[in-house]
Image (tube, rainbow, N blue to C red):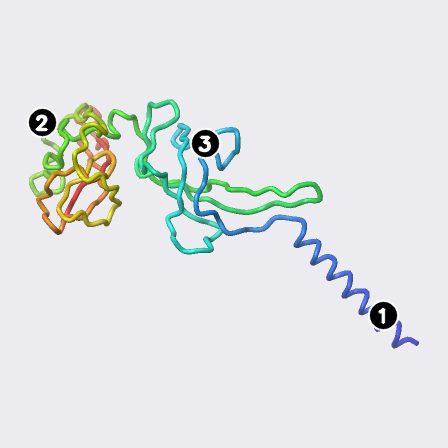
Amino acid sequence: MRKLLLCLAVVLLGTIMDAVSLNGQRYGSWDVPCDGGLSPRFSAPFSHGVIYGGKEFLTNWSSVLGTRPLPSYNWYYASPDRNPTSKDGTSRWDNAGVYVHCWVERNPYYLTQHRDPVGYRGTVRPVTTACGEFGGGDTQTELFAVVSDEYDPYDSALTLSDGGGDCGSEGENTGSGTQYQPGDSTGGETVSWGTGEGNGGTSVCGQLAVVEYVCIDLWDDATGTWVEWGCGYVTTC
């Protein structure tokens, strides 16, 4: 009889533990694979877009990974424009990226999917310095000095007010229009400083031309510090 009672106790205990385990799977929170793409308001549906650098950005986001399933912590880049403009039109997010944590929360009343931004990359800056061509031109030849031995950031000919440019308007783009990313080979074509799209120019690197994303710093005598003039796409070799 004592042996029978002991067996029944073991069975009941196992049943209770199974119920607790089952309940833990049904209610609570846990990580899930991230989605391949995210909408502009993914972090707070019907509220706002991604806020970074004090500005709000409404843009779609695409995973940097092509494999599936995606991890529950995953990097995304702005799509289709890697350098989106803020909602108020005053700023631009160069090389925009957001690191997202994907998880779900479940209780007896509802199931909620969370896509929380937990990290960011890129630089937010005024539009006037985010997309202007160096010296106001629309070809990459004016930028070559920046990556050559002849480039002198102390040159008085360079000023912090240079580079208003035309922000690469669609009407002036006579090149391939291919959207290149850092590390891509262009086959000899130059790219737009502001967007990274092929603009039809001829790179001094020829067939060895590879796209890089660079930032230009100028020395400001007034403050005695380096000041970032702007960041953009160039071809190097």
Of labels 1 and 3, the one closer to you = 3
What amino acid is found at the position of numbered circle 3 in the picture? Gly
Q: Residue at x 40, y 28 (%)?
A: 54
Name the foreground residue: 152 vs 198: 198
Whichever of callouts 2 and 3 sits on the residue coming sooner in the sequence is: 3
Q: Amino acid at mark 2?
A: Ala
User: Considering the numbered disc 3 on the image, is that residue within a helix, a strand or a loop?
Assistant: loop
| Label 1 Cα neighbours within 10 Å, binned few <14 / some 14-19 / many ≥20 | few
- The answer to the question of whether label 2 and label 3 lie on touching residues, with beta carbons closer than 8 A, is no
User: In the displayed structure, would residue 6 be above or below residue 68?
Assistant: below
Please say if 47 is above or below 184: above
Task: Name the residue that disc number 1 marks.
Answer: 8
**Tag count:** 3
Q: Nearer the viewer, residue 237 or 9?
A: 237
* The one of 28 and 200 positioned closer to us in this rendering: 200
Per the image, the residue denoted by label 2 is 157
**Residue 77 placement: quadrant:** top left
The spot of residue 42 in percent (x, y) is 49, 37
